[in-house]
Every structure is written in structure tokens, then in C-alpha cells.
Image (cartoon, rainbow, N blue to C red):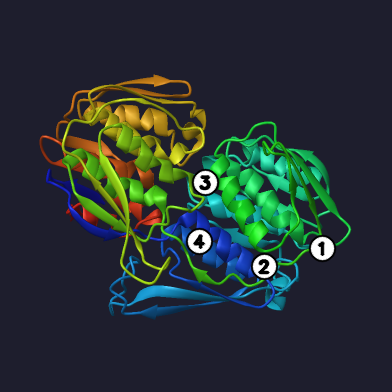
């Protein structure tokens, strides 16, 4: 599918979809919990639906409520109804897969397909190690290139049987039980560590899981995971620099209730569109106190020359909804941005760098090459097609801005963040931009092309 985006000023008020990271964590924890959880306004996307399918196969009972709720940013079905709640009955201490006797009777391992969702793959791999039956994992072509090697070695060190394809990629089969112990886990992606932190408390009573993390990228996502453990009253000793953790087994999760926060990673794209074209835009559904690291994007664009302002809507004390306003009057200026904690911002900041005066350096982010695509190489190539001057570095990207991009045709590389970044870029280009593979945006934001006014071609 192609999206053809023509230049225009991007303005308006937009409700941001729920956070994918929050949604997947809440869904898996609810699937493992005792009792019934009600998750309000979860993200309805390809990745979260993959997680829902995995949760059901692990034994959770999951039903959805849809309603004609025009304020919900989830996509509507043919009747105009949107997903507004998942109700989840957890497996309540039973091993993953053991809650489904019919699946026990099947030949071979329980088969789980995570689609394109790396978060689901990594977190569910550790969850699978809590059970006694073999569980196998597959995914799409991109997942087949993403290694879980360090996580798999840590699981082996905890007594879990692991079989994997070349370089720790799917197909992967995991079989518990979890025996505990001390493991060393380098984390080029924080999802490896989040996987162990979420699963370890549910290991058998009397086990102790000790983790050494000599390398940790994307630290804010660990803050998010630990916030969930703390809210659940789960004991988890940690070093101040997150280099060591000790988690006793024998714990249990309570139901996960309430609304899922809006996604700052997704909000960066309409925010960038406002920065490129001047705006103004207002973004709803975000919480300025949320642990998501990507909220730093709005500080970055403020330093580049945008006006960014949080306003709280009128209402009872401390209950009014927040509105984030973004606009720009003067030129954008380049800068140096360390993206070690926030690698998902690389595509959208690369686009802003092309529109800024001077150089923009995106540094300390070599792990951006390990995402759905090598985002450093991909953004250098595609922005180059539109006339931007980019230089790859092993750990980042240098963009020499000219304040303008040309029209043309680019490739989204099956990467949702690359597609959305290029659609935002097209709004300020000298002519229309045709983006191949635009359907990939549905991984985190179904309907994003509607915001940019894109014409969709199915050729």
C-alpha cells in the first residue's frame, strides 16, 4: 500500500492512542494475574492484537467491549464501534498453557505467533519459562531477524530449556520450570530485562532470581516496568544504577484495572508535523507525569525552536485533562541529541533535522540498528532520496539541514516509525511524497494516514 502525502499546514486537535508499551505490559500481567482485570482504552493495533492472541493461548480468558465512542482514538469497525475495554480473567497461578486442557492434548509444543511484536516476543519468552510444557514462538519476517540471544542465555541460566534458530532468532522453544539463580544479562534492548523482571516474581516459592545487567539501553522502559511491580507490591531489590536486581519467587499479580495512558512515542509524529509546518496542534490523552522516556521529544523540539505548552482543562482539582500544544513561528535549529534512552525517536528527529538550520546529531544510539529495521541506515537512505544530506555513524546519524525537502518516492521498509516519520516529513516538502509500505503504521497507530490527509493507493 502507498500513501501519497501532499504539502500542507498541519493543525488541529488530536487524541493520542494508548501506549503500546503500557498496553502490552498490562495485558500480560492481567493474563498472569489472579481474578478479573478491566483494561480501559487499550491500544487497538496489530502489535497489541498479537499480544492478545498470545495471552489467550497461554490460558487467559479475554473478551472485548466495543462502543460508538467518538472520543476514542482506536480504529472503528464497520458499525462505527471502537475497542474501549478488554476484560481479562487471568490464569491465577497456573503455568502458561496449563489452563487449557485441550491444548495439553495437542501434539508438540504450544505454538505462539507474535506477528511483528518484538515486545510480545521478549516478554512472553520469559513468561513461557514459568510453565512445564514446551511453548514455541514464531513471527513475521522482521521478527525472524531480531535476536533474543542474550535473553535466551539468561533463561538457560535460570534452569529453563531453550531451543532456538540461528543467532537466537525464532523459531524458539522454551520449557520450564524456572529454577532461579544468578545470571548476567547485557541489554542492548531493555525488553530483555523487563521480561525477566515481570516473570521472576511468579517463579516458585523459594526461588531467587538475581540479575546482573552490565549494559542497559532504554532505561525509561525499565522505570515503567518497575513502576508496575511497585504498584503491585512485588519485592524487587535493585541497585541505584539498575546494574543488579534480586527478585524472590512465590508472588502473584492482582488485577490490572483502569485506563491505559496515551503514547508519547506516537505523539511525537503529530508533534513533528506541527514543528515542520508551524501548527498549531493540540494533543490530548497524555500525562506529563508518565514514566515514558519519549516524552523528552517535546523538550527536544522546544530547544529546536518550537513553542510547547502543557495546559490542564477546566474541571475539579487535579482531575482536568491535560492538553499539549505545539506550534512554531521562527526557524528550526539543529542540535545534539543523545538517544540512548529513547531510540524510537531517531526516525522522527532525523526528519526534523532535515528541516532545521545547521547540523543535527543523533548520537549514542547504535541499538537503533536492531529495531524493526536498521533505522540509522534506512533514514539516511530515504531522507537522501528527498534531498537531505545525511552521514551515518556507527552509533548515530548526522543530518545537515537545508530547511526543505523535495517531493518524490520513498520506502517505509515495513517499519511503522519510519513510515510515520516520512509522512510527517512530506507535509513540509516541496511536492507530494509517495511512501511505500504505509500499512505498517497500523502496528502502533491504525489510521495515522488519515491525520496527514494521505491519498491511499493499493497498487
Q: Are marks 4 and 1 in contact (CB under 8 Å)?
A: no
For the residues labelled 4 and 2, say whether their Cβ atoms are less than 8 Å apart. no
Residue 366: percent from the left, percent from the top?
50, 28
- Relative placement, left or right, of 158 versus 365 is right
Give the residue displayed 55% in from the left and 41% down from the top.
146
Vertical placement of 443 versus 148: above or below? below
What residue is disc 3 on?
143
Name the element at disc 1. loop
The disc, 3 or 4, on the residue closer to the chain's N-terminal end is 4
Instruction: Please give the name of the residue rendered at 39% of the width and 79% of the height, measured from the top-left corner.
Output: 66
Q: Which residue is mark 2?
A: 32
Which marked residue is nearer to the observer: mark 2 or mark 3? 2
Report, in whole angstroms, how far the alpha carbon at label 2 lies from the one at label 3: 24 Å
Alpha carbon of mark 3 to alpha carbon of mark 4: how far?
A: 20 Å
Disc 3 vs disc 4: Cβ atoms closer than 8 Å? no
Q: Position of residue 164 (x, y in %)?
A: 67, 44
Distance, label 4 to label 2, CA atoms, is: 14 Å
Which residue carries the number 4 mark?
23
Label 2 environment density (alpha carbons within 10 Å; few <14, some 14–19, many ≥20): many
Residue for point 66% across, 58% down: 229
Name the foreground residue: 433 vs 402: 402
Q: Which label is found at residue 250?
A: 1
In the displayed structure, does residue 452 sit left or right of residue 67?
left
Secondary structure category for the residue under label 3: helix
The disc, 1 or 3, on the residue closer to the chain's N-terminal end is 3
Q: Nearer the viewer, mark 1 or mark 2?
A: 1
Amino acid at each position: 500500500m502507498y500513501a501519497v502525502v501532499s504539502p500542507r499546514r498541519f493543525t488541529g486537535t488530536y487524541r493520542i492512542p494508548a501506549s503500546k508499551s503500557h498496553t502490552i505490559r498490562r495485558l500480560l500481567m492481567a493474563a498472569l494475574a489472579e481474578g478479573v482485570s478491566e483494561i480501559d482504552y487499550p491500544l487497538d493495533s496489530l502489535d497489541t492484537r498479537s499480544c492478545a492472541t498470545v495471552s489467550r493461548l497461554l490460558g487467559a480468558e479475554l473478551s472485548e467491549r466495543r462502543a460508538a465512542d467518538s472520543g476514542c482514538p482506536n480504529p472503528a469497525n464497520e458499525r462505527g464501534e471502537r475497542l474501549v475495554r478488554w476484560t481479562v480473567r487471568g490464569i491465577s497461578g497456573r503455568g502458561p498453557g496449563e489452563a487449557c486442557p485441550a491444548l495439553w492434548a495437542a501434539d508438540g509444543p504450544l505454538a505462539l505467533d507474535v506477528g511483528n511484536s518484538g515486545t510480545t516476543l521478549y516478554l512472553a519468552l520469559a513468561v513461557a519459562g514459568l510453565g512445564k510444557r514446551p511453548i514455541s514462538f514464531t513471527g513475521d519476517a522482521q521478527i525472524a531477524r531480531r535476536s533474543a540471544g542474550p535473553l535466551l542465555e539468561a533463561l538457560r541460566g535460570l534452569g529453563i530449556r531453550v531451543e532456538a534458530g540461528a543467532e537466537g532468532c525464532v523459531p524458539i522453544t522454551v520449557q520450564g520450570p524456572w529454577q532461579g539463580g544468578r545470571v548476567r544479562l547485557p541489554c542492548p534492548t531493555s525488553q530483555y530485562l523487563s521480561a525477566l523482571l515481570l516473570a521472576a516474581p511468579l517463579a516458585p516459592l523459594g526461588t531467587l532470581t538475581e540479575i546482573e545487567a552490565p549494559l542497559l539501553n532504554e532505561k525509561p522502559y525499565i522505570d515503567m516496568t518497575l513502576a508496575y511491580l511497585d504498584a503491585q507490591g512485588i519485592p524487587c531489590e535493585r541497585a541505584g544504577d539498575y546494574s543488579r536486581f534480586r527478585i524472590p519467587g512465590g508472588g502473584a499479580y492482582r488485577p490490572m484495572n483502569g485506563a491505559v495512558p496515551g503514547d508519547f512515542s506516537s505523539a511525537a509524529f503529530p508533534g513533528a508535523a506541527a514543528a515542520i509546518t508551524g501548527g498549531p496542534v493540540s494533543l490530548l490523552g497524555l500525562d506529563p507525569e508518565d514514566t515514558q522516556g519519549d516524552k523528552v521529544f517535546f523538550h527536544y523540539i522546544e530547544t529546536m525552536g518550537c513553542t510547547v505548552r502543557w495546559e490542564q482543562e477546566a474541571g475539579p482539582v487535579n482531575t482536568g485533562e491535560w492538553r499539549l500544544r505545539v506550534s512554531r513561528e521562527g526557524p528550526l535549529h539543529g542540535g545534539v541529541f543523545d538517544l540512548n534512552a529513547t531510540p524510537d525517536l531517531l526516525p522522527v528527529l532525523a526528519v526534523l533535522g532535515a528541516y532545521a538550520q545547521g547540523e543535527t546529531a543523533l548520537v549514542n544510539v547504535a541499538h537503533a540498528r536492531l529495531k524493526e529495521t536498521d533505522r540509522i541506515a534506512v533514514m539516511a537512505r530515504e531522507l537522501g532520496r528527498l534531498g537531505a544530506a545525511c552521514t551515518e555513524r556507527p552509533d548515530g546519524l548526522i543530518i545537515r539541514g537545508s530547511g526543505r525537502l523535495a517531493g518524490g518516492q520513498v520506502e517505509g521498509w515495513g517499519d511503522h516509525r519510519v513510515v510515520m516519520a516520512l509522512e510527517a516529513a512530506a507535509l513540509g516538502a516541496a511536492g507530494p511524497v509517495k511512501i511505500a509500505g504505509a500499512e505498517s503504521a497500523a502496528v502502533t497507530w491504525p489510521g495515522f494516514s488519515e491525520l496527514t490527509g494521505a491519498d491511499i493507493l493499493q497498487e
